[in-house]
Amino acid sequence: MSLDIARIRHDFPVLQREVRPGVPLVYLDSTATSQKPLAVIQAMDNFYRLSNANIHRGVHTLAEEATALYEEARQKVARFINAPAARQILFTRNTTESINLVAYAWARASLKSGDLVILTEMEHHSNLVPWHMLAAERGIRLEFIPVTEEGLLDLEVYRALLSQDPKLVAFTHMSNVLGTVTPAEEIIRLAHEAGALTLVDGAQSVPHLPIDVRALDVDFLAFSAHKMLGPTGIGVLYGKEKLLESMHPFLGGGDMIKEVKLRSFRPNDLPHKFEAGTPAIAEAVGLGAAVDYLTEAGMSAVRAHEQEIIAYALERLEEIPGLHVLGPSADKKGGVAAFTLDGVHPHDVAQILDMSGIAVRAGHHCAQPLHEKFGIPASTRASFYIYNTLEEVDKLVNGIYKVKEIFG
Ligand code: C6P
């Protein structure tokens, strides 16, 4: 079933706006954050209009409604990624916090000096810095699966690293720069054979690919609502139940306890053990609505649409003289086209495109080591989602020709 893009675009109020009079928005920055459909905006609006209350605390009607809506969102997320149980879905602030939760609550208790954590060269800073911090604090060892010229992971080197008794393999499922979809199932299977746990950074994969945590057999999966049509301020950590049960809490405070004495406490059951303080309640409701929206569209159809767009985008971009796209061919990636243009700084490209209403991102996209690997300080990145069209790719290409004209 293919997507009805005209109908989908109609659902996103921001896509109806003009950036300047007569200049419609061409939003090609969904890898940074996606736009939100009316269904998400209205679900949050309704929550604040009708059901706003704190959760898990009151017995009054609004508190019960708010709690039910919050927990229903958890159920929806669990179904979306085929988690065995909703209590394995922990609400955090974002992918970054989810990864830090693993670094603090699991790794600090489980890893000692000299223990090996395997990462990759294509990681976002969110899946590098928490491990740098642990390396400095605990003396854990970090090794990296190299990225090939083509923008793929070098699995030969990975296999060799696995002989060094790693404790954790933490890697992105889709690069936010190269767009590369990594062979997560194989990486996880090999890690498990070597006795290591796995953490998948799903910030870019969960919004764009069908995800089944049971098929992947992943131990931890981190992702953010704001990249999958939901609001900012809420993210998810999925974990295997035994692991989550065995871990100490991350943050201490209200809601994450069963009982508190002056000098001690007993932690709450899952998932509340990891949700200290008043959570992002309206945001959870918004995430639930986003999951409904994506489920209705069908994640296979979302993936197919993006494959069509990226194949066309690469074909058109690669015909521009002096333009170099980073990463592999369309069949090996998601809807991300980061590129450099000879003689023009990526920020200038982005700024001139903005004059035509085209929103792209320029910089290192929080993946500095990856850019260093390719010998460039920065790139311009166009990224695509459920609401983008082939005509928008044409507008991007025309915009880049305009950039070339200006820079001679
Ligand atoms: N990448 C981008 O423009 P947060 O900020 O916690 O929601 O997500 C962090 C993150 C982690 N991993 C990957 C692969 C990501 O792409 C991101 C966010 C955005 O590429 C913002 S830097």
Image (cartoon, grey):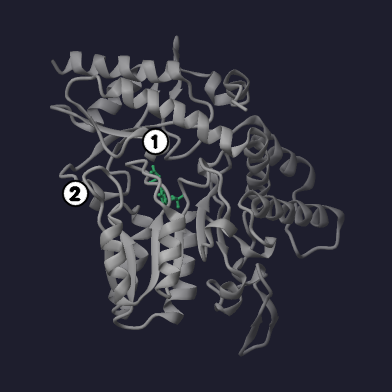
Per the rendering, the mark at residue 242 is none
Please determine whether, in this image, residue 1 is positioned above or below residue 276. Answer: above
Tell me: is circle 2 under 8 Å from ligand 1. no
- The Cα–Cα distance between marks 1 and 2, rounded to whole angstroms, is 25 Å
Q: Nearer the viewer, residue 42 or 198?
A: 198
Q: Residues within 10 Å of mark 2 (few under 14, many from 20)?
A: few
Q: Amino acid at mark 2?
A: Glu
User: Could you tell me if the residues under marks 1 and 2 are in contact, i.e. CB atoms within 8 Å?
Assistant: no
Residue 92 appears in the picture as rendered = no
Q: Is mark 1 within 8 Å of ligand 1?
A: no
| Front of the two marks 1 and 2 | 1
Does the image show residue 310? yes
Residue 100 placement, left or right of 286: left
In the picture of the structure, the residue carrying the numbered disc 1 is 331
> Dot 2: what SS?
helix
Query: Which residue: 61% across, 31% down?
Result: 37
Return the residue at label 2.
372
| x and y, in percent, of residue 404 in the image | 19, 17
Badge 1 marks a residue whose secondary structure is helix
**Position in image of residue 349 (x %, y %):** 25, 26
Query: Would you identify the image quadrant in which residue 267 lies?
Result: bottom right
Q: Position of residue 398 (x, y in %)?
A: 31, 14
Q: Residue furthest bottom?
A: 263
Front-lying residue, 353 or 190? 190
Q: Which amino acid type is marked by label 1?
A: Asp
Q: Is residue 297 above or below residue 118?
A: above
The correct choice, above or below, for 303 with respect to 398 in the image is below
The quarter of the rendered structure image containing the C terminus is top left
Q: Residues within 10 Å of mark 1 (few under 14, many from 20)?
A: few
The residue located at (63%, 64%) in the rendering is 88
* Mark with earlier residue (1, 2): 1
Of the pair 138 and 145, the residue shown nearer to us: 145
